[in-house]
Image (spheres, helix red, strand yellow):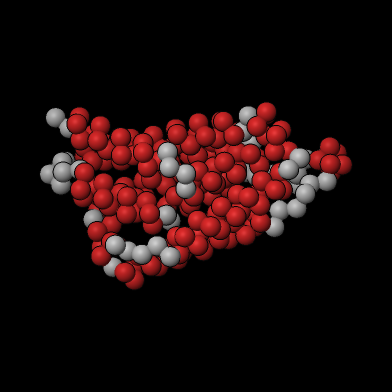
Amino acid sequence: MYWMEFFTVALIHLLAVASPGPDFAIVVRESVAHGRRTGVFCALGVGSGIFVHVAYSLLGIGLIVSQSIVLFNALKWLAAAYLLYIGCKALRARPARVEACEEQAPATPRTGKGAFVTGFVTNGLNPKATLFFLSLFTVVINPHTPLLVQGGYGVYLAVATALWFCLVALLFSQQRVRSGFARLGHWFDRLMGAVLVGLGIKLAFTELK
């Protein structure tokens, strides 16, 4: 009975998740800089962040946020500040000394928990995701659809997002890809930092429509 609605939701989500944005940038950066395990944890964090949007959409809080310029701006500036913080840190990346890389492992290796939290916060604080899920749950999904079914849609969206970004992590964490970035790793960090800063600035000027 709800298959057509589900396929519509799945198609819209596929088009949205495939569009490069903060989630894509952060997963790529974590994967290239720290490897497959870290990239996958970051991807799982992004997928888990979807549950935040699903939860408030089902509770109707998303509608309140969409109607309140103050709340929307607060969320927008918080997310923009976070992206700018991560981006500025990446922009300060320095060339790694070859001798140091050969002699010892990094003093503070990236933990799976840290990568997961980064992915979760990046997705959870994205106000564009807020508007996307608001539109999805108010326009695409029939309000008479049972909450249990809507919750099922939410689980699918979270799992599909996690799987998509796990694929991204697997691609960009391949040894051949990482080796290609090895010598110019600091420039890659700076490039991704510039992308994140740009996304943060763009987000800061996003207006509620």
Give left or right: position of 139 versus 109.
left
Q: Residue furthest bottom?
A: 70
The relative height of residue 105 versus residue 175 in the rendered view (above or below) is below
Could you tell me if residue 120 is visible in this image? no
The answer to which quarter of the image holds residue 70 is: bottom left
Closest to the observer: 134 or 48?
134
> Split into 4 quadrants, where in the image is the C terminus?
bottom left
Expressed as whole percent of the image width and height from the top left, the position of residue 127 reads 38, 57
Question: What x and y, as percent, mark residue 11?
Answer: 30, 35
Q: Say whether residue 13 is left or right of residue 19.
A: left
Q: In the shown orientation, is residue 63 left or right of residue 180?
A: left
Identify the image quadrant of the N terminus: top left
Q: Does residue 106 appear in this view?
A: yes
Residue shown at 83% from the left, 46% from the top: 97
- Pick whichever, 120 or 130, lies toward us: 130
Q: Position of residue 185 (x, y in %)?
A: 71, 44
- Residue 59 locus on image (x, y percent): 24, 53
Q: Is residue 11 above or below residue 147?
A: above
**Image side of residue 178 versus residue 81, left or right:** right
Task: State the residue at coordinates (20%, 29%).
Answer: 3
Foreground residue among 202 and 149:
202
In this rendering, the count of numbered labels is 0
Residue 126, by quadrant, is bottom left
